[in-house]
Image (tube, helix red, strand yellow):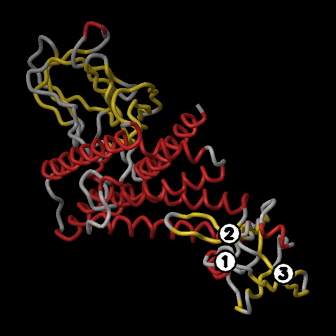
Amino acid sequence: MNTIIAFILMFGLLVFVHEFGHFVFAKKAGMLVREFAIGFGPKIFSIKKSETLYTVRILPMGGYVRVAGEDPEIVELKPGQHIGLTYNAEQKVNKIIVNNKDKHPTAQVIEVESADLVHDLTIKGRLAGEETLQTFYVAEDADYLMNEVETQIAPYNRQFASKTKRQRAMQLFAGPLMNFILTVVLFLILGAMQGVPVTEARLGEIQPNSPAEEAGLQPGDHVVSINDTSIAEWIEFQTYVSERPEQQLSMIINRDGEEIELAVVPRAEQMGDREVGRIGVMQYVEKSFARAIPFSIQETYEWSKLILVNLGMLVTGQFSVDMLSGPVGIYDATDQIVQTGIWNFIQWTAALSVNLGIINLLPLPALDGGRLMFVGIEAIRGKPISPEKEGLVHFVGFALLMLLMIIVTWNDIQRLFL
């Protein structure tokens, strides 16, 4: 149960932060956001506030922010169609009732001659039994009712395509950006609460009944040398000890300004196909918010670099697709990490967040990076690619991504359960 709760919270946080970035910058640019969704597939929860429908959907494979104009608009009126109209206080149409007009007895019924609900926001038509053609002006936030389901119309100035290239690019980039910001924040919390490892060879926690405790080493001791070899950095100390299992080491340590010589014998521990030496000490950490800030940025950079290196290995064939993990594999890893404590879980969440940000910036169709690529092509060409062609590319890309997700999920199931 703890794993389920942790996974839901982690997944919800990662997707919410990502989509919130898209949402905020869409709103800032004046775009009409039709839906803010966590997950895909059938809805399990929904609520509408203002002009946006907020939904939680059954498949935990991502989320989306649906902005007007990104998909073909479903609002359409045809000549000869009979519709009902209601008006606001300014005598502009605020509801367009396509069917079930008998449920709206106060609506004025007209026969449509023509309509423009994108640019002019007008409907031309005739009242029942009259020959005179009239023009009805439509409010920018008017609702289109089909089968009693309301859909707000989207004037061109509220659509994605109407915005500048900079506004569209920023709206697309904002999702991954928020994932990077979340990663920095999580590492900042880790650094401030758990402490930031120092680079010098200074000893932290001493494990009970360890060779270090038996030798008399104490937290805060500075390692000066081992076997007459000068030691300055923690990584040097760690490497020297690791390479000498079961060998007596003569250590000079500085304790409160006084140099002391101690002897310690690292225990041999099996790591893969080789033995390594361990004396049972942790790296010294400092709990300082000032040090946590650069630490959080550095950790985000290091994780980003690691992910990019692995992606490069995947592209060059050095890394097999079979080694990738989908939701099932991530759930299994989360189950193992949750058992090791809250701090490891926070680090795991931070790693997944930066991973989500980088993956979404890849120039692949259906991803944010792919859509950013089309904005870049438009900037170079001086004109956009036709929405139909771009939509087809993203549709094919999305289908291929879903196929990859199915393959990866099946590999996870085989690896874990079969």
Q: Amino acid at mark 1?
A: Val
Q: Position of residue 18 (x, y in %)?
A: 45, 50
Give the amino acid type for the residue marked by disc 3 in the picture. Leu
Label whose residue precedes the other's in the sequence (2 or 1): 1
Residue at (26%, 62%) from the top-left corner? 375
Position of residue 404 in the picture relative to residue 241 (left or right): left
Local crowd size for mark 3, using a 10 Å CA cut-off: few (<14), some (14–19), many (≥20): some
Q: Is residue 393 left or right of residue 140?
A: left
What residue is pinned by disc 1? Answer: 241
Q: Quadrant of residue 43?
A: top left
Residue at the spot of label 2: 278
Q: Quadrant of the C terminus?
A: top left
CB contact under 8 Å: marks 2 and 1: yes
Viewer-closest of 58 and 324: 324
* Residue 401 drawn at (x, y percent): 26, 48
Residue under pointer 3 = 262
Relative to residue 156, is residue 201 drawn left or right? right
Is disc 2 surrounded by few (<14), some (14 to 19) or many (20+) residues within 10 Å?
many
Between residues 394 and 242, which one lies in front from this camera angle?
242
